[in-house]
Image (cartoon, rainbow, N blue to C red):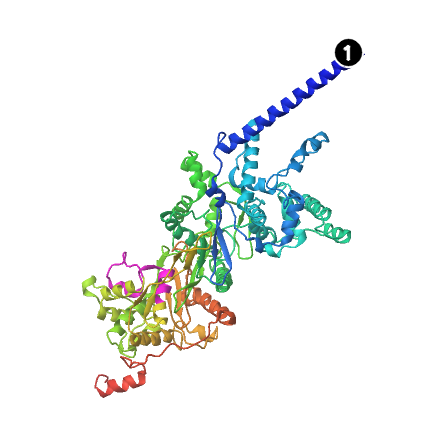
Amino acid sequence: MKKNAKKKKRNYKHFVKWFWAIIGFFFILFNLFILGIVMGVFGKLPDAHQLENPDSPLATEIYSSDGVLLGKFFNENRSKVAYDEINPLVFNALIATEDVRFKKHSGIDLRGTLSIPYYLIRGQNRGASTISQQLAKNLFHRKYFNTLFQKIVQKMKEWVIAVRLERYYTKQEIITMYLNTVDFGSQSWGLKAASKTYFNKLPDSLNIQEAATLVGVLKAVTRYNPYLNPENSKSRRNVVLGQMYKYGFIKSQTEFDSLIDLPIKLDYKVESHNRGLARYFREFLRMDLREWCSENGYDLYSSGLKIYTTIDSRMQTYAEEATHEHMKSLQESFFKHWKGRKNAPFSHLSEKEIEIIIHRAIKQTDRYRSLIAEGKSWEEILENFHIKRKMKVFSYDGDIEKEMSAWDSIHYYKYFLNPGFMAMDTRSGQIKAWVGGIDYRYFKYDHVNKKAKRQVGSTFKPFVYTVGIMEAYSPCRKVPNVQYVFPDFDNWKPKNSDNKYGGMMSLKEGMARSVNCITAFVMKEVGPEAVLKLISNMGIDISNMDPYPSLSLGTPDVSVFEMVGAFNTYGNNGTWVEPTFITRIEDKNGNTIKEYVAREVEVLKNTYNYVMLDMLQAVTRGYGTGVRLRYRYNFTNQIGGKTGTTQNNSDGWFIGTTPEITAGCWVGAEDRSVHFRRTDLGQGASMALPVWALFMQKTYADSTLGYKKSDFDIPEEELPVELDCSKYEQEEEFNGLVE
């Protein structure tokens, strides 16, 4: 009996010895393993610099001049938010759900880790990763591994990095960094983007149930997405609220019971470049900044830049409203105008010519490029484009679903007239509104962009008259309304649009009525070279313009951007100021890395400029082509402007300048063969001027903008010519020049 007892005792000691030996072996092995990780045996760990400056991709944010976020450029829609910009309810929900001992541990929750085997035995899958460990994973170990050993190595690395993060950062900084890095689904990385996407709020405005909903999403971004799976999301939100109640963040059973019964109310908008304000401008900005970013070592989509633009969100809204309002009405008229017409809406084209246009449009589509990549022949591509299927198409009353072929859709969109509108502050040159088309989702081409050039028609005429005024021609000077011949240019002889001639007409009346022959007279006197020199100083690209007298009738193609900038010279007392659209760029830390200052060029003396303003105001008064600004839109303030209509009514223009704002609008179809058949419908005063008028009405009505109806500055110096035509005629009679 004693023998057996001694033997059992020996066996017990032997077992204990081996037990502790094995424990010691694994302890030493574990420490060697950790040491190997720290030493970089299993892959390099982030160094001190990387820990202090973690590289997390941040979206570039675009801001208006009045502080509104217009949009973002991103690969991951992520924006940083500071600790004090987050409602504490979000922290409470996160801690209660993910890491209740967050404020007590130093990166690793040993109590939670040691409890894992217990929960596994009970069949419960419960993780023990702390917020610090999850942050370590988000910042430095985002890839997934297949083998168990790789997963163990990854987990140990997260432990080491988590401990290091706790040494470098405060608890406030760690939890804020975590919320800035996590994926909330719906293309929203970070709390700021998620708050905006799901609730259209900033993080400091979230209420307790919204905070719980967002924290609940982190468990599984698709399964608990409140938009995609509302019932799952509500259930998960209530779990989070339950954790908050359990750990004292919700004080009473009554409050908890009332919260879990609340529905989830979303204001859901996924961030998209196709939506929001100033879509055409944002795309122009993206293209403009790509080269600068590349040259200066920034990534436009991940460097977290902040672009502060000159666009005013209120004025941009008014511009988009004005454009939509007028274009909807104009398009209805255009549809009626062409209803029942053969080969509509193409004017005077044969079916073969129309087919060529449609074929050209096909070759510009993504579908064509995709089919070409698949090795399809032209015949197969045409067959594909004739297959009917359901598709959404644009209408002014909202998207509509139709069954049509891609061929039909191309023809459908050929019917639409397109606008291009830009407004700028007269004195500063800052662009305040930019509308490049009808709807960016369906019409990608930007009709304001400097590369989008269309024939300008009579809006070019003031430049010709300006050169004449600079040579001391009086606006009151009368010349014969006859056809003038240019012998050096194949005896070119321009006609008046109404084919009416005879009598004498003043230069002012000639410009106000947009009479071609009077403009041709001035061009013959001053020469096209002088006109080209003038407009070059006013910011218009003349590289593709030849010094022909036909310039006087507006034959050149010029962009809305250039034309508005040039006309602004008149409102700005004769000084051209470069149209600017950015004030400054900041890096992700708020440091200004680029500032923009507009260039200025004195084009003509203030006194000569005032004479031109007098002529431009005649366009919007009395018999001028822009007079409907007075009788239809009730403007009483001083406005200098010019309408423009090109051959066959393919392009309609109006540009107007005031002491406060210069704005211009072009309207026309994608193809110049698509237009109104009647000038009363297709002239600039009908197609483009109403957009200008509606925009200015809305702008002046908003007192917060600070724009007041004022008069142009009268020069202190004596004017070079007489503006009172009654006095001018008396002087001419006295000198024997008028019989």
Question: Can residue 342 be seen here?
Answer: no
Residue 78 position within the rendered picture, expressed as x and y whole percent measured from the top left: 52, 48
Image quadrant where residue 236 sits = top right
Residue 551 covered by magenta stretch: yes
Name, please, the residue furthest toward the right: 1
Q: Nearer the viewer, residue 491 or 95?
A: 95
Drawn side of residue 80 relative to residue 503, left or right: right
Drawn side of residue 573 relative to residue 400, left or right: left
Q: Nearer the viewer, residue 109 or 602?
A: 109
Task: Give, as a single range, the part of the protein colored magenta.
Answer: 540-567
Residue 618 vertical placement versus 68 (above, below): below
Residue 99 position within the rendered picture, expressed as x and y whole percent measured from the top left: 64, 43
Question: Can residue 397 be seen here?
Answer: yes
Image quadrant where residue 202 sits = bottom right
Residue 520 covered by magenta stretch: no
Drawn side of residue 496 relative to residue 426, left or right: left
The quadrant of the image that shows the C terminus is bottom left
Residue 597 position within the rendered picture, expressed as x and y whole percent measured from the top left: 36, 62
Q: Which residue is painted at 60% across and 56% down in the image?
A: 204
Residue 128 vertical placement versus 305 (above, below): above
Q: Which residue is mark 1?
A: 3
Q: Nearer the viewer, residue 527 or 583?
A: 583
Q: Which residue is painted at 46% across and 67% down in the image?
A: 690
